[in-house]
């Protein structure tokens, strides 16, 4: 292109800034002399105002990266939890601050499982240890209990230069991985856990995406298919779209409290094998967005299915402490796998995930998590270690927090009673809000909500009038239309069920149970009133 426009050259030169700093800036040099007809052509092609040939202007205006030239897989990525309705909620918040009159005074964001943003208080012990890790001089402060100081010293000793500002090993700080392994052994009744099979991650999401990167391969009919539940957490569909994998949907049974039916897994697998190579099965337990807790029998059935069909199991267990319903209990996939005997425990490949972001902790911003791999091929494991090394290491403060989650105060330690009281209060309050959400929503004609057995969300079905469906279909999904009107009229931000997947002809929304009880009651009352107005308007 420069041969087409020899009258000008653009290059970078340093521009002086204060304190000896400099940055690169474009410098347009004087047009080069040319002879003969080419000089005339070039001169005639110059813009009279700038003296820059039009061909150079066109070249400078053309972007290397455009929507047409960018990675096409990225354009397929959708993430409903932070999608258009959330962007509109943020815009409304700005309008309220600017004095724009609305029929409400605040936006209530019930769209995402961000506990602290909803007012949940952090666990004292966790923040004490993290404070000392961040500012070690506090280790000499008598206001901090000795058990917290001991945890902080141990974590700092595992860090380069005894600072959480240093990089860690790519797999994570060794003493933290040791503590995670001991935690898994306690949780699973003595089933062995090897620290070398533990990978600390940037939240559970990082581990999930990393495993999917290892699994996705092939082209055409040999392209990897990954089985995910519908409704699903949009991380999975977004990651599969970005990786160019095939999403294989299996439907949870709404009529049976969003239970998982192995016959549905068989149907989905048989259909998928006609056009791809299904290699992995993802389970979220307790469920997001549906709030179900899988029974032990269901988990056994899933493991047998995976073993028979030679599928890699991915168990998303970030809500393992969030179990509320009577008669429900969390069973880890690893524990059940090993209790089923060597036929399964020595063959089924499994990766399980946990996080600091959910349960009673709610520490989303620290981005702490781990994954444990079971029965992974040693050569693949070497590739996994190489892959995680590319991103250097997970955030070290998040690793420190993960250590405290798996190694909390023990009986007899100074912080134990406060820790247990705070943990119990948080989980009891969540259980109360789970029951309250189900009860109030089920009093609304046209809304049906299954029991919120666990996790942090309800996913009620909404019956919409035919007129509303017709009007919505002009530009958006009916439940998006419903949720957007709810936001504009009440300031309540929910996520439409279409963002998570649902059976054709059904409509839902996902709502967190995280707002404080008094605010949750107001939220539910506003949803009830809005729904009645909406039905009346469109009937």
Image (tube, grey):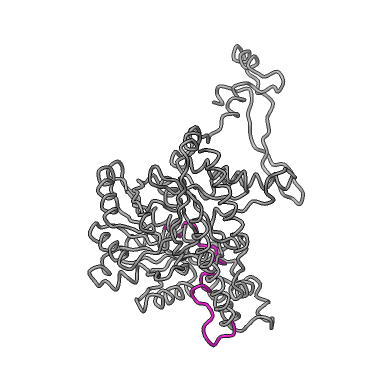
Going by the image, does 303 lie left or right of 137?
left
Q: Position of residue 49 (x, y in %)?
A: 72, 20
Going by the image, does 211 lie left or right of 24?
left
Task: Name the residue furthest bottom.
Answer: 412
Q: Position of residue 10 (x, y in %)?
A: 63, 31
In this picture, is 253 found above or below 116?
Answer: above
Going by the image, does 379 lie left or right of 239?
left
Q: Position of residue 443 (x, y in %)?
A: 50, 56
Q: Residue at (43%, 41%) from the top-left corner?
A: 73
Between 19 and 114, the residue placed more toward the observer is 114
Between 305 and 65, the residue placed more toward the observer is 305
Q: How many marks overall?
A: 0
Q: Residue at (68%, 33%) from the top-left corner?
A: 27
Identify the magenta region. Answer: 387-415
Assess whether residue 389 is covered by the magenta stretch: yes
In this picture, is 133 found above or below 236?
Answer: below
Between 14 and 418, the residue placed more toward the observer is 418
Asked if residue 378 shows in the view, the reply is: no
Between 226 and 40, the residue placed more toward the observer is 226
Asked if residue 182 shows in the view, the reply is: yes
In this picture, is 153 found above or below 106?
Answer: below
Going by the image, does 302 lie left or right of 173?
left
Assess whether residue 228 is covered by the magenta stretch: no
Quadrant in which the N terminus appears: top right
Q: Residue at (61%, 80%) from the top-left corner?
A: 149
């Amino acid at each position: 292109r420069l041969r087409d426009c020899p009258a000008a050259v653009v290059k970078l030169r340093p521009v002086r800034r204060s304190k000896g700093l400099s940055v690169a800036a474009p410098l347009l040099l004087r047009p080069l002399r040319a002879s003969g007809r080419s000089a005339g052509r070039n001169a005639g092609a110059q813009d009279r105002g700038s003296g820059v040939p039009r061909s150079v202007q066109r070249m400078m205006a053309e972007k290397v990266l455009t929507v047409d030239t960018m990675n096409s897989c990225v354009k397929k990525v959708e993430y409903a939890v932070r999608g258009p309705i959330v962007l509109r909620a943020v815009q409304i918040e700005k309008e309220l601050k600017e004095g724009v009159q609305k029929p409400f005074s605040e936006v209530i964001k019930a769209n995402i499982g961000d506990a602290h943003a909803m007012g949940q208080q952090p666990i004292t012990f966790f923040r004490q240890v993290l404070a000392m890790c961040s500012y070690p001089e506090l280790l000499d402060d008598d206001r901090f209990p000795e058990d917290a100081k001991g945890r902080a010293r141990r974590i700092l000793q595992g860090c380069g230069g005894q600072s959480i500002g240093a990089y860690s090993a790519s797999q994570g700080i060794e003493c933290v991985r040791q503590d995670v392994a001991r935690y898994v052994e306690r949780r699973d009744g003595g089933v062995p856990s090897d620290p070398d099979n533990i990978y600390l991650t940037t939240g559970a999401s990082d581990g999930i995406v990393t495993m999917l990167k290892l699994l996705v391969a092939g082209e055409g009919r040999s392209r990897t298919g990954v089985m995910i539940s519908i409704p699903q957490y949009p991380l999975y569909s977004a990651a599969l779209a970005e990786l160019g994998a095939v999403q294989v949907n299996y439907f949870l049974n709404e009529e049976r409290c969003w239970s998982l039916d192995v016959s549905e897994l068989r149907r989905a697998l048989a259909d998928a094998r006609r056009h791809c190579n299904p290699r992995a099965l993802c389970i979220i337990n307790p469920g997001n967005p549906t709030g179900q807790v899988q029974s032990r029998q269901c988990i056994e059935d899933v493991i047998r299915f995976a073993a028979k069909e030679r599928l890699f199991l991915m168990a998303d267990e970030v809500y393992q402490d969030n179990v509320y319903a009577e008669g429900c209990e969390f069973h880890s996939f690893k524990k059940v796998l090993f209790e089923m005997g060597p036929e399964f425990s020595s063959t089924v490949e499994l990766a399980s995930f946990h996080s600091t972001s959910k349960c009673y902790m709610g520490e989303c911003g620290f981005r702490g998590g781990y994954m444990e791999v079971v029965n992974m091929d040693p050569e693949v494991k070497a590739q996994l270690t190489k892959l995680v090394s590319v991103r250097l290491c997970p955030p070290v403060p998040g690793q420190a927090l993960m250590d405290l989650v798996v190694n909390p105060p023990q009986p007899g330690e100074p912080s134990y009673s406060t820790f247990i009281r705070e943990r119990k209060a948080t989980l009891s309050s969540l259980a109360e809000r789970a029951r309250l959400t189900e009860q109030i929503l089920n009093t609304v004609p046209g809304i049906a909500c299954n029991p919120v057995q666990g996790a942090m969300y309800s996913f009620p079905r909404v019956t919409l009038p035919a007129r509303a469906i017709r009007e919505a279909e002009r530009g958006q999904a009916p439940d998006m239309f419903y949720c957007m009107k709810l936001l504009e009229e009440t300031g309540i931000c929910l996520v439409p069920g279409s963002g998570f997947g649902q059976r054709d002809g059904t409509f839902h929304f996902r709502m967190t149970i995280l707002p404080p009880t008094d605010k949750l009651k107001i939220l539910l009352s506003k949803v009830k009133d809005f729904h009645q107005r909406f039905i009346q308007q469109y009937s």
